[in-house]
Image (cartoon, helix red, strand yellow):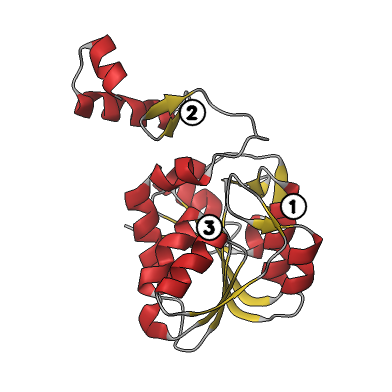
Amino acid sequence: MQELVERTDASESTLRRDLTELENMGKLERVFGGAVLPSSNLQEPSIEDKSTRNLKAKRSIAEYASSFVQDGDSVFLDAGTTTLQMIPFLKDKNPVVVTNGLPLAEALNIAGITTYLTGGLLKPRTGAFVGSGTLMALGNYHFDICFLGVNGFHTEYGYTTPDPEEAAIKRMASSHSKTTYMLADHSKIHKVSFAKIMDLQDASLVVNRLGSAELSEFEKLTSVKVVE
């Protein structure tokens, strides 16, 4: 960011506002310290990059989503940065949590929440466990409620993510849960990644911002919870 300030002779606040506007237009993607050109639908940002994007929105979504958890529920949290933000709001609900996210397992343990980690093949960029070992572990559990992150949601193409293996994990977790919520900040709307997770109607959507026309469009296909 400092390099942009020096090159453009603009204030940091002005540059942040301009970068946000360009990201909303799909012209670039915000990363820690600046921005990059839009990635392909195969490329997945690292957990470090994702954790710094739209953090305020992710916290709002996480707090709202946590209100759906009842005392003593069995919960699946997948390996995402928005699901990670849910953990502080779950401490007083006494849940039993299963996750395929190494960063989540560490945070859950620190919070004193009963946690089962699936294991499997660890992806260095995202800290997610995937593969046959993860699927086998998930087959042993059934959940009251399931929370999944997503890289894009679209009326025609549904919920998508760059990695087919992560898509398979999300599908199985959802199939073993009574209720599934997809958590997505507003930057994911109309985005389409390489691997389809499921159709819109297969999970409720929790998002921080939608225009009235967009809300009407998505509500025809699924339950939508908009966090103000």
In this view, 50 is above or below 141: above
Percent position of residue 58, x then y: 39, 54
Q: Amino acid at mark 2?
A: Gly
Quadrant placement of the C terminus: bottom left
Of discs 2 and 1, which sits in the foreground? 1
Q: Which mark is residue 26?
A: 2
Q: Which residue is mark 1?
A: 165
Q: Secondary structure at mark 1?
A: helix
Q: Residue at x 24, y 13 (%)?
A: 6
Q: Amino acid at mark 1?
A: Glu
First-in-chain label (3 vs 1): 1
Q: Are marks 2 and 1 in contact (CB under 8 Å)?
A: no
Depth check: give the residue in front, 218 or 127. 127
Q: Which residue is mark 3?
A: 219
Residue at 78% x, 65% y is: 133
Q: Earlier in the sequence, mark 2 or mark 3?
A: 2
* Amino acid type assigned to the residue bearing label 3 in the image: Glu
Q: CA distance from mark 2 to mark 1?
A: 26 Å
Front disc: 3 or 1: 1
What percent of the width, then of the height, locates residue 203?
Answer: 61, 64
User: Marks 2 and 3: CB-CB under 8 Å?
Assistant: no
Q: Toward the viewer: 150 or 221?
A: 150
Q: Residues within 10 Å of mark 3 (few under 14, many from 20)?
A: some
Q: Secondary structure at mark 2?
A: loop
Q: Residues within 10 Å of mark 2 (few under 14, many from 20)?
A: few
Q: Quadrant of residue 162?
A: top right
Placement of 96 over or under 87, stated as above or below: below
